[in-house]
Amino acid sequence: MLTLEGRTAVITGAARGQGAETARLFARLGARVVLGDIRDDLGETVAAEIGDAALYTPLDVTDESRWAAAVDIALDAFGGLDILVNNAGIFRSMPLRDESPEAFESTLRINLVGPFLGIRAVREPMIRAGGGSIVNISSIAGLTGIARTGGYGASKWGLRGLTKVAALELGEYGIRVNSVHPGIIDTPMVEGIAPPAGPGNHPGVALRRTGLPQDVAGLVAFLASDASAYLTGAEIAVDGGSTAGRAPAVTPTA
Ligand code: NAP
């Protein structure tokens, strides 16, 4: 059985989507959770729903001073910091010819520099605690090239690489660092882009459905827990098999 009993986590982008679902699951597994986001009203609501085990703090991941504040809240209110989930992100889709340098850079700043600042912020407290787990939410766009995702894909490939470097540098302190690569997951981020979540036509997805936030939260909880104690520097797809190869368009009947 997975447990996060006695652990404290900071989760970014936790006001909605996968981050909110991960916060809910962590609390059910016994963790205390600091939720950070830029959508303050939504974040406060999710934290209030979870109850005493959760606190919300405004955390723009590009702002180093807000990272320091989030770490202080975890230490002061919950007495420790064992888990960081670098989940906040933005998605922009356009061909390279239409992507301005400013848009490209701002995507990198949120999706890649943000997690870098997070890793820097938790490094010392986790070393003092004797270890920890950092989970970086990349994407299948960080495992393979996907057209029309220039800045987004670059940020997610970058986060996959940063994960390896951090795993190598922090392993001696008992800090594990892994990346998670979701396929299409039914959240507000992909509203109007993703196929409907129910059964239907999901070309290329072996499991023939869009993913749910719970699908990602389960993997993140595993990586945050001692069940994955010997796992670091790994990259794990949670994508219904969409990067496994080519799924047949029609299931053979004989
Ligand atoms: P979501 O529903 O849009 O939630 C992401 C949250 O992060 C939003 O509340 C967003 O606020 C917030 N955020 C944006 N910029 C931020 C910043 N600078 N600081 C702090 N928070 C910020 O997205 P999701 O689908 O749950 O995605 C979570 C992660 O999974 C992202 O890293 C995403 O790239 C990755 N992912 C998602 C999918 C998918 O299909 N959903 C697939 C692969 C990977 P705003 O809404 O105001 O931007």
Image (cartoon, rainbow, N blue to C red):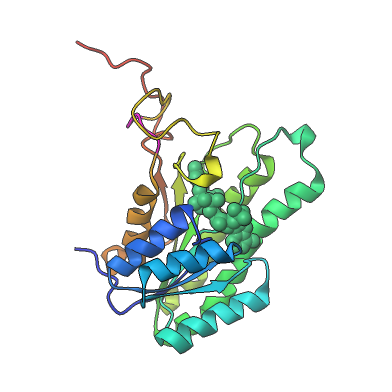
In the rendered image, the vertical position of residue 102 relative to residue 220, given as above or below: above
Quarter in which the C terminus is drawn: top left
**Residue 112 visible within the image:** no
Q: Residue sitting at 45 percent across and 53 percent down?
A: 18
| Chief SS of the magenta region | loop
Which residue sits at x=32%, y=55%?
218
Q: Residue at x 63, y 67 (%)?
A: 60
Front position in the image: 189 or 2: 189
Q: Which residues are magenta?
A: 206-210
- Left or right of residue 136, residue 117 in this image: right
Q: Position of residue 30 (x, y in %)?
A: 28, 72
| Residue 230 picture location, percent across and down | 32, 65
Say which of 62 and 160 sits in front.
Answer: 62
Vertical side of 175 occupied by 156: above or below? above
Image position of 116 with respect to 157: above or below: below
Q: Position of residue 37 (x, y in %)?
A: 56, 65
Can residue 204 be seen here? The reply is yes
Give the position of the N terminus as an image quadrant: bottom left
158 falls in the magenta region: no
Q: Residue at x 57, y 60 (%)?
A: 162
